[in-house]
Image (spheres, coloured by chain):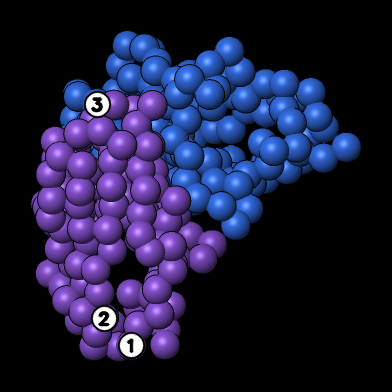
Chain colours: A purple, B blue
Amino acid sequence: DIQMTQSPSSLSASVGDRVTITCRASQSISSYLNWYQQKPGKAPKLLIYAASSLQSGVPSRFSGSGSGTDFTLTISSLQPEDFATYYCQQSYRTGTFGQGTKLEIK
Amino acid sequence: QVQLVQSGAEVKKPGASVKVSCKTSGYTFTGYYMHWVRQAPGQGLEWMGWINPNSGGTNYAQKFQGRVTMSRDTSISTGYMELSRLRSDDTAVYYCARDIHAYIVATTLDYWGQGTLVTVSS
């Protein structure tokens, strides 16, 4: 099975900050990497698919990059509504998720 | 608009089975793979498998093989996930979700149901 490891597990930041979350796959997954945002009590929301494609309706402050085993999600300027938990997911073989990164207000 | 509406919360005893439904609208049900994902309390997301609503074909995560059955009723655009031999660690919110592309499996989930809490307790 492909394992996905996110770092950090939690992160404190302020409105307006630039934030980067990293995801590493246990083997090469090409660009088969998605990012989701989840708020408490809600279903996840797709932000980025195929490593760098922005899902329709998602603000352009979100961006993704990477290929092979190392990927990043960047939020260019944090907004109050961005404080949530973020998950990466590989879609190369089945659909393993990372353990999540909780983004909190500093 | 695309909607996935799941059945209500369930409480089950260890060893029992549970069947969760996911009624869809706003798109061609048979055109998009349906996935199931679960989330234990305070934990991360766990992908369980998919069903091709057109053919009925399925693919389950190894962890759930032998215990999970995904099915569908095309006449009412509804998918189902049944989990048997329930244990306390199956307590979780179970989500259905639609795959992003028509007619292929991309395991990229663009629309989600609201979730169904299944509690397993004696």
Graded by Cα atoms within 10 Å as few (under 14), some (14 to 19) or many (20 or more), the crowding at tag 2 reads some
Q: Give me the disc on residue A14.
A: 1
Q: Position of residue A9 (x, y in %)?
A: 43, 62
- Mark 3 belongs to which amino acid? Val
Q: Which residue is mark 2?
A: A78
Is A78 displayed left or right of A44 in the figure?
Answer: left
Proximity of marks 2 and 1: CB atoms separated by less than 8 Å: yes
Q: Give me the disc on residue A45.
A: none
Residue B23 drawn above or below residue B65: below
Graded by Cα atoms within 10 Å as few (under 14), some (14 to 19) or many (20 or more), the crowding at tag 1 reads some
Q: On what subunit does the disc labeled 1 rest?
A: A
Q: Which residue is mark 3?
A: B105
Is A74 displayed left or right of A38 in the figure?
Answer: left
What separation in Å lies between label 3 and label 2 (alpha carbons)?
33 Å
Is A40 displayed left or right of A61 in the figure?
Answer: right
Residue at the spot x=29%, y=52% of the render? A23
Residue at the spot x=17%, y=76% of the render? A76
- Nearest to the observer: residue A72 or residue B108: A72
Q: Position of residue B122 (x, y in %)?
A: 88, 37
- Mark 2 belongs to which amino acid? Leu
- Nearest to the observer: residue B54 or residue A99: A99
Q: Nearer the viewer, mark 3 or mark 1?
A: 1
Indicate which disc, 2 or 1, sits on the residue closer to the N terminus: 1
Confirm whether circles 2 and 1 share one chain: yes
Residue B75 seen from this side: no
* SS type, badge 1: loop
Proximity of marks 3 and 2: CB atoms separated by less than 8 Å: no
* SS type, badge 3: loop
Q: Position of residue B66 (x, y in %)?
A: 58, 13
Seen from this angle, which residue lies furthest right? Answer: B122
